[in-house]
Image: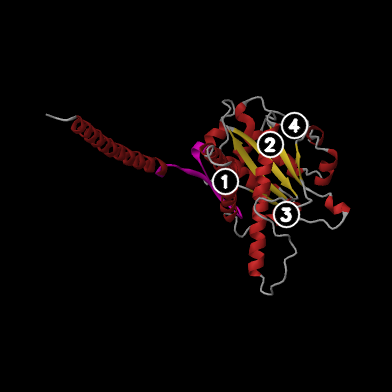
């Protein structure tokens, strides 16, 4: 007669066997999907291939179709946004493009992914003593910032006057422009210099969540200061004479003492009527700013009246303009 233990063991064995069979079928299905995906990717046709000093891009037919949906309000994807911002800096600006550095959209995706993971980790640590939890959180944040900044090896962000960060959150594009980033790590020697600061200008066509913009600026400030730490360490390693570096040696998370950055929310900024237009607004904001650049210190002292600075702002022809630019680079 079969005992209760034998019945349980037998049931477990059957369940285990079912899991194996299901795993095998899922493995076969996964391989089939991967093969189909490879076939699909192999058929993708690159319409534009262009290399910029720091990045190279390929735009495909499906990217172009999204731009060309003028009547259907197509969304702009990251490939188009990254391409046009680099085109703006390296092909349209009259002044030296070395003043501006454009970050790829993927950088913010990576940062945002780590922020979400941080929140999940925090929820799992509710039972841990608060001081231990805080220490773990700081160590994790520091490690992730190091990983991000290592991807910029060889690029000194403090050689630039402007840093462009395209931001994509919840299906919406915005732009953070960092002016005078070197002032985040600059120690003033007199009262006038101590009042100097970096400016984080927020360009958003749906300016509703102001606290989120301040949080985003803080995240980018940590990132820039982390990059400064790496630059300092690299400079110290490469110093053959062992001279003391005059730049303060900052930690990854600490803000330079006595220095501040200001978050600037322009007033009178034209706002979108359709959700899919955030990308075209963001690109037009960037183009207007760099083709008629206001003085950063004036903005910090008097504010930034966008409507008064760019009274003829319009995105009515922006999608057609993007298509025309792509046709100029198209190999077909």
Marks 1 and 3, the one that precedes in the sequence: 3
The residue labelled by disc 4 is: 269
Marks 4 and 3, the one that precedes in the sequence: 3
Q: Residue at x 33, y 39 (%)?
A: 30
Crowding around mark 3 (Cα neighbors within 10 Å: few <14, some 14 to 19, many 20+) is few
Q: Residue at x 82, y 50 (%)?
A: 196
Q: Residue 124, percent across and down?
A: 51, 38
The residue labelled by disc 1 is: 132
Magenta residue check for 211: no
Q: Secondary structure at mark 2?
A: helix
Crowding around mark 4 (Cα neighbors within 10 Å: few <14, some 14 to 19, many 20+) is many
Farthest residue, direction left: 1
Q: Is residue 49 left or right of residue 222?
A: left
Measure how far apart labels 2 and 1 are at the Cα level.
Answer: 29 Å
The residue labelled by disc 3 is: 96
Q: Residue 285, percent across and down?
A: 71, 37
The residue labelled by disc 2 is: 213
Q: Secondary structure at mark 3?
A: loop
Magenta extent = 42-63
Measure how far apart labels 4 and 3 are at the Cα level.
Answer: 27 Å
* Image depth: mark 2 or mark 3 in front: 2
Crowding around mark 1 (Cα neighbors within 10 Å: few <14, some 14 to 19, many 20+) is few
């Amino acid at each position: 007669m079969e005992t209760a233990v034998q019945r349980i063991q037998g049931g477990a064995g059957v369940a285990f066997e079912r899991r194996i069979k299901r795993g095998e079928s899922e493995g076969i299905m996964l391989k089939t999907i991967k093969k189909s995906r490879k076939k699909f990717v192999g058929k993708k046709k690159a319409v534009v291939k262009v290399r910029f000093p720091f990045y190279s891009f390929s735009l495909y037919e499906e990217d172009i179709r999204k731009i060309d949906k003028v009547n259907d309000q197509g969304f702009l994807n990251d490939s188009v946004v990254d391409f046009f911002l680099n085109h703006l800096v390296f092909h349209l600006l009259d002044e030296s493009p070395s003043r501006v550095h454009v970050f790829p959209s993927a950088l913010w995706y990576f940062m945002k992914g780590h922020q979400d993971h941080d929140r999940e980790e925090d929820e799992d640590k509710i039972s841990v003593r608060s001081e231990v939890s805080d220490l773990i959180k700081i160590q994790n944040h520091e490690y992730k910032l190091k990983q991000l900044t290592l991807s910029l090896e060889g690029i000194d962000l403090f050689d630039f006057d402007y840093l462009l960060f395209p931001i994509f959150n919840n299906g919406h594009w915005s732009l953070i422009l960092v002016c005078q980033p070197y002032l985040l790590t600059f120690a003033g020697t007199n009262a006038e210099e101590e009042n100097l600061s970096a400016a984080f200008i927020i360009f958003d066509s749906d300016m509703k969540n102001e606290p989120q913009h301040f949080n985003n600026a803080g995240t980018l400030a940590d990132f820039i200061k982390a990059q400064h730490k790496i630059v300092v360490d690299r400079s110290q390693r490469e110093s053959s004479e062992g001279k003391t570096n005059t730049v303060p040696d900052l930690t990854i998370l600490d803000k330079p003492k006595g220095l501040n950055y200001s978050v600037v929310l322009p007033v009178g900024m034209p706002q979108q009527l359709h959700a899919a237009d955030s990308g075209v607004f963001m690109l037009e904001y960037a183009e207007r700013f760099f083709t008629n650049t206001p003085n950063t210190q004036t903005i910090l002292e008097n504010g930034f009246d966008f409507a008064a600075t760019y009274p003829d702002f319009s995105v009515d022809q922006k999608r057609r303009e993007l298509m025309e630019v792509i046709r100029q680079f198209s190999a077909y």
